[in-house]
Image (tube, rainbow, N blue to C red):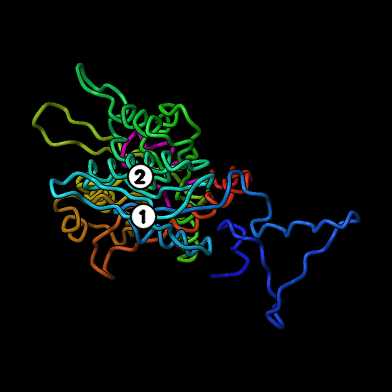
Amino acid sequence: MNPNMQAVRGERPRRTSAAKGEPVRQSKDPGGSPKPAPSPWGAQPAAGALRLFSGNSNRPLAERIAAYLRTTLGSAAVGRFADGEIDVHIQENVRGSDCYVIQSTCHPANENLMELLIMIDALRRASAGRITAVIPYFGYARADRKTQPRVAISSKLVANLITEAGAHRVITVDLHAGQIQGFFDIPVDHLFASPVFLEFLAAKRLQDLVAVSPDVGGVERARAFAKRLKAGLVIIDKRRPRPNEASIYNIIGDVQGKTALIFDDIVDTAGTLTKVADRIHQEGAKEVYAACVHGVLSGSAIELINESAVKELLLTDSIPCQVPEGGKFRVLSIAPLLGEAIRRNHCGESISALFV
């Protein structure tokens, strides 16, 4: 373990000389009392020592976040009883600590959600100083309003459950609808994965680029992405003239001779994505790329993408993606983004610079 991390893990600060590996003596103030060693985080922690914990939904991402923070995951057993009920045991002292539970509520959504809730409850009952739910992918986000009579607003229910379980704050990435932040009665840090995509795309130096919103609801997201890329904007107007008739995809904007980049928050069955890609290609686009933050990839999504006009699909590791290596799929990590948000939150620093 890096000696500079000892203060974060709740131990006495101890720094070593790079030349001799000897401890650096603490200086004393005029009164003779030793001055506290500076925190390796720059600012004093907001609430006790930093502790990271992970459920079973996306442990590889949690380990990458821990590596970014130069620490390790806390010891917690998250298993099952014989009848399938979830059993959580926090196996280290967290009294007064600043605890972060890293857990996506992806498939199986209900299992992973219950793991998150029970881990938060276990930490609360273990007298953790502060508990933050780090949810890279927030499940049930698509049920954010009543689209017809007598249906549930499940995302509000999930927000209530997380709050009542004992979370003090939520950190999440690219919610399906921004208003879900208001469903929580606790602070929410809503991050965006666009910087991860922008860095990768800048290195590719794509020419004549246009950002494509696959539906009217994603226009704001695609517009912000296009602005950062200094690219044009194209909108797809999807209409179904009558029930049981095929949808019509009208293109608003020019794609002739352009490199098109379809940007969306979720790719699930990939039906809309592949149809939009094929339609754009038919209208004269040179190449079609796609960037989707959360790769749910249900059913035959991978096969549809492989057979479509999409040249390359960029995803993040907010959800564990079981995609074939190479080919059309490229998975980028959001661990540095989440790790930096956790670091700044722990130190009481502003994270507004991450909201891009």
- Residue 208 in the magenta stretch? The answer is yes
| Residue farthest toward the left in the current orientation of the protein | 244
- 333 and 308: which one is in front? 333
Q: Mark 1 points at which residue?
A: 76
Q: Is residue 256 visible?
A: no
What's drawn in magenta, residue-wise? 206-226
Give the total number of marks visible in the rendering.
2
Mark 1 belongs to which amino acid?
Answer: Ala
Residue 284 position, x and y percent, is 30, 53
Residue 15 numbered mark, or none: none
Q: In this view, does 198 lie to the left or right of 115?
A: right
Residue 150 position, x and y percent, is 19, 17
| Residue farthest toward the right in the current orientation of the protein | 30
Q: Mark 2 points at which residue?
A: 119
Residue 1 vertical position relative to residue 105 in the rendered view, above or below: below
Element type at marker 1?
strand
Q: In this view, does 344 lie to the left or right of 332?
A: right
* Residue drawn at point x = 67 percent, y = 49 percent: 44
Residue 288 position, x and y percent, is 32, 56
Q: How crowded is mark 2: few (under 14 residues within 10 Å), some or many (20 or more)?
A: many
Q: How far apart are marks 2 and 1 (CA)?
A: 9 Å
Look at the numbered discs 2 and 1 and tell me whether their residues touch, using CB distance below 8 Å.
yes
Mark 2 belongs to which amino acid?
Answer: Met
Which image quadrant for residue 324? bottom left
- 70 and 109: which one is in front? 70
Q: How crowded is mark 1: few (under 14 residues within 10 Å), some or many (20 or more)?
A: some
